[in-house]
Amino acid sequence: MTHTDLIPSRRGWLALSPMIVFLTLYVAVSAMIGDFYKMPIAVALTAASAWGIGVVMRGGLSDRIGVFSRAAGHSDILYMIWIFVLAGAFASMAKEIGAVDATVALTLRVFPPQLLLPGMFLAACFISLSVGTSVGTVVALAPLAAEMAGAAGAPTAMYVAAVIGGAFFGDNLSFISDTTIAATRTQGCRMDEKFRANIRIVAPAALVSFIAYVFIGSDFTTAMPGLSPAAATPWLIAPYLLIIALAVAGINVAIVLSAGIAATFALGLAGGHDALTLCGYMGAGIDSMGNLIIITLMAAGLLGVIKSAGGIDYLLQRLTARISGARGAQACVAALVGIVNLCTANNTVAIITTGAISRDIARTYGITPRKTASLLDTASCIVQALIPYGAQTLLATALAGISPAAPWSYMVYPWALAVSVGISVAWVRKKREK
């Protein structure tokens, strides 16, 4: 290796070092001490951001802070924060007036206990496929998942993991999902072509996950404390029915949540709560989103620093340097979008970032556009579901009141999907050789 080869390599790794600092502080340290609750994710992000601004970036301090601030204050990030605020207000008020308990009680009346966990997974799959967004699915089901877990005497993280996994099932497959749109447009294929290629990978993983959750959930069916189906007030489930109906109809998630808040407020007034008390419930829910909002802003700013320093471009250059054969090309496409997703914490952005170079790789090695689009969407959803600082996991765990890392050990679907992707790549290669 020559001296000129060493210089960009060092700069590239330096540009990526903020992410390495974050992963070391949060994931590595937490794994070593065996407790993901000890190291707050906000502290790890703050330290990594300080490293990026102070060491990695060049120019005046005000310019460096400006890069971080512009990334943190991007319109997409602020829109997400609005969703967090509305979700917190709705979840808190719905819980306080008894809507959550009523919905859980009705569910316990309809479904046998051993099917609660797989049923939650299937509900998330159906809603996300209809809505086309994992965030909307998490908003609708995460509070219910937490209460269901308590009713079944099961770990809350288990039910939240089932919701997150099912949410990404639809995010990956839905025709109206932003990841589907991004993947098909960057690769130049029709949505139905991508769907047919995708369903062969996704369906086995979903089936395996459902069966796994049947067996896992059967171990937590004896407790059922605290909820009496006969005592439930049926009309209190209306806010959740409204949320799900509007979401399935494809209404913007902010409008869906606003409608849910209005309906819950009206039910609260009808149930004897005064307006100031209901506002207090909403305020408490908004306050509970504070840590989540801070994490979101810090993560967005950190990722903006990495991108500005050239870290993403360096990743693309290094990962595409050595590709061997069609199977290697497909593996490279999956790795590209997965690692970029790890650095951006946004699967749509990862697909758009790697779309053009993935299309060039596919043309060079004879990979069909529908297969490349499927790999981009699926691999990005796998990583997005597994990282504890992704918007979906942060929102779900905030609504459930658990650590962002808590669902990780119960995430059956993303791992099953990863295995399915690996088999798909290997099988297509063998078929091509025949």
Image (spheres, rainbow, N blue to C red):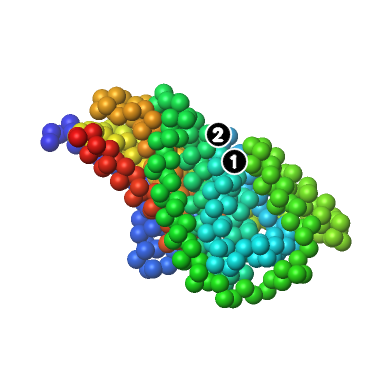
**What SS does tag 1 mark?**
helix
Q: Quadrant of the C terminus?
A: top left
Residue at position x 62%, y 69% in the image: 151
Q: CA distance from mark 1 to mark 2?
A: 7 Å
The residue at which mark 2 appears reads as 176
- Tag 1 residue: 131
Do labels 1 and 2 touch, CB within 8 Å? Answer: yes
Within 10 Å of disc 1 (Cα), the crowding (few <14, some 14-19, many 20+) is many
Between 58 and 347, the residue placed more toward the observer is 347
Where residue 79 appears, as percent x and y from the top left, is 61, 39
Q: Quadrant of residue 136?
A: top right
Report the residue at 33% width, 28% height from top: 368
Which one is nearer the viewer's eye here, 75 or 94? 94
Q: Residue at x 72, y 62 (%)?
A: 102
Label 1 is placed on what type of residue? Val
Quick check: can you spot residue 353?
no
In the rendering, at what x and y percent does residue 265 appear? 80, 52
